[in-house]
Amino acid sequence: VQVVESGGGLVQAGGSLRLSCAASGTTFNINAMGWYRQAPGKERELVARIPKGGGSVIYADSVKGRFTVSVDNAKNTMYLEMNNLKFEDTAVYYCYADGPYILPTWGQGTQVTVSS
């Protein structure tokens, strides 16, 4: 399995961005996908996690009500809709996928910069 992120960029505070994560390879082995982020000098943190076949979605408290994660199984693509962005959302955002028969798979990351 491979995952590739896209959609990062520079946005003003209060603005919106949508990130995409396209999975390829043996995608039928994927049970869940998610987004992590890492800001300079900070540890990587979970942003959102979504089961590929439906179920409970997990969000970090800091993004609840502002970010929405979704998955299009037909396209093997996960999205992260980010609204009302704040300066503290600035980070490199990483997509990941996991499942019982695959190692956790990470993308190369996409930069999101929010100007205050």
Image: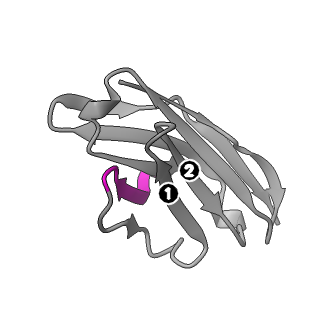
Asked where in the image residue 88 lies, by quadrant, the reply is bottom right
Q: Are marks 2 and 1 in contact (CB under 8 Å)?
A: yes
Q: CA distance from mark 2 to mark 1?
A: 5 Å
What type is the residue that disc 2 sits on? Answer: Tyr
Q: Is residue 9 left or right of residue 67?
A: right
Q: Which mark is residue 19?
A: none
Return the residue found at the far bottom.
65
Asked where in the image residue 14 lies, by quadrant, the reply is bottom right
In the rendered image, the vertical position of residue 52 relative to residue 55, given as above or below: above
Q: Magenta residues?
A: 39-53
Residue sitting at 43 percent across and 69 percent down? 60
Q: Which mark is residue 79?
A: 2
Closer to the camera in the image, 64 or 55:
55
Residue 94 in the image: x percent, y percent?
50, 41
Residue receiving disc 1: 70
Residue sitting at 47 percent across and 41 percent down? 95
Residue sitting at 16 percent across and 30 percent down? 101
